[in-house]
Image (cartoon, rainbow, N blue to C red):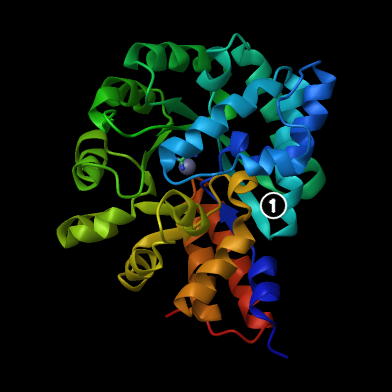
Amino acid sequence: MTPTLAEFAFGLPKAELHLHLEGTLEPDLKFALAERNGIVLAEKSVEEVKATYDFTDLTSFLAVYYPAMEVLQTAEDFHDLAWAYLLRAQAQGVVHAEMFFDPQAHTSRGVPFDNVITGYRRAAVRAQDELGITAELILCFLRDFSAEYAMATLMDALRYRAWIIGVGLDSDERDNPPGKFAAVFARAKAEGFFLTMHCDIDQAGSIDNIRAVVEQIGVDRIDHGTNIVEDPSLVALAKERGLGFTTCPVSNSFVTEQMKSTEIVSLLRDGVRVTINSDDPAYFGAYVGDNYVALAEQAELSLTDLVQFAINSFEASWLTPAQRAAYVARVQEYAAAHGVALPV
Ligand code: ADE
Ligand code: ZN
């Protein structure tokens, strides 16, 4: 019997490659952590918290996102946040997660780097042991802070080198182009980290920034980056290099007026390694399986298209070739078991 779209999408084994751990802070956990840490919140109910989720663009989202982090203080808090995400992710078919974290959003308010990373790492190890999910951490620098602060954060991170698979760049892209962090990313590459950077949707100079991350920084992956469709020669280069694109349809519909389904599907049809992810699911109300369903409904995708997105998620991951192949085989078996044709 053919499964429904949601059944198929949720059960499909998939990797999540664009997920901010701080963006998984659900209001009920926020209240629990506030109480544990003796913090009095301005909002008194889940409804009041949700009423503040009034985003029209990236800047208005970030203005709500950073202050909410005040409840995160101890290693236990960071563990509990990541663990809650991993449980929700498992329920939506995630078997591998490469998760962003923003140490500077915490060190800049006096919380030690060690609290952040030891808590997150404990949840990642526990996910492997108890859920069978492989989970890795990607350290993101906040691009609206200085390059010097990013470099100092990278130096701190070297003490935990084995716990961090790669580095990324997030926060407000406006007036903070990739070149500002060229030396930091060159040093990270020399230390053996994989590289990715956000190229947010419809930013001033989007296409120039995408060209810089490909040609100047030499990233392994691009987060969002769908404005690349404006330059077919860059799309061809991204395809030739096998660059992954971590798109986030529901997030796009909050920070712009659309999911950018036309752009995402155009990359899929062009054979680019484009993937579907959730970004900040507690704020945008959609985890990764929900994003698969939302995009499929909006763009009238086939189940075979969803299989291609899942295969792309492993091929764009930073797993070893053998791990990637094993996960891709799991996707293919899942499709076959549901009578869904494999992509050609
Ligand atoms: N931080 C959390 N989510 C982000 C996004 N989508 N873009 C930039 N910075 C972010
Ligand atoms: Zn993001």
Rendered residue at 23%/28% (across/down):
179
Residue 223 position, x and y percent, is 41, 46
Residue 97 position, x and y percent, is 60, 46
The amino acid marked with disc number 1 is Ala
Image position of 308 with respect to 112: above or below: below
Q: Camera-side residue: 86 or 58?
A: 58
Q: Secondary structure at mark 1?
A: helix
Horizontal side of 297 relative to 208 (left or right) equals: right
Residue located farthest toward the bottom when viewing the structure as drawn: 1
Rendered residue at 68%/88% (across/down):
2
Total number of numbered discs in the rendering: 1
In which quadrant is the C terminus drawn? bottom left
Image position of 319 with respect to 331: above or below: above
**Visible in this render: residue 26?**
no
Q: Residues within 10 Å of mark 1 (few under 14, many from 20)?
A: many
Horizontal side of 196 relative to 50 (left or right) equals: left
Residue at mark 1? 89
**Visible in this render: residue 167?**
yes
Rendered residue at 66%/54% (across/down):
95
> Quarter of the image holding residue 196?
top left
Residue 340 position, x and y percent, is 59, 84
Image position of 103 with respect to 29: above or below: above
Horizontal side of 79 relative to 298 (left or right) equals: right
> Quarter of the image holding residue 106?
top right
Horizontal side of 96 relative to 186 (left or right) equals: right
Rendered residue at 77%/35% (across/down):
29
In which quadrant is the N terminus drawn? bottom right
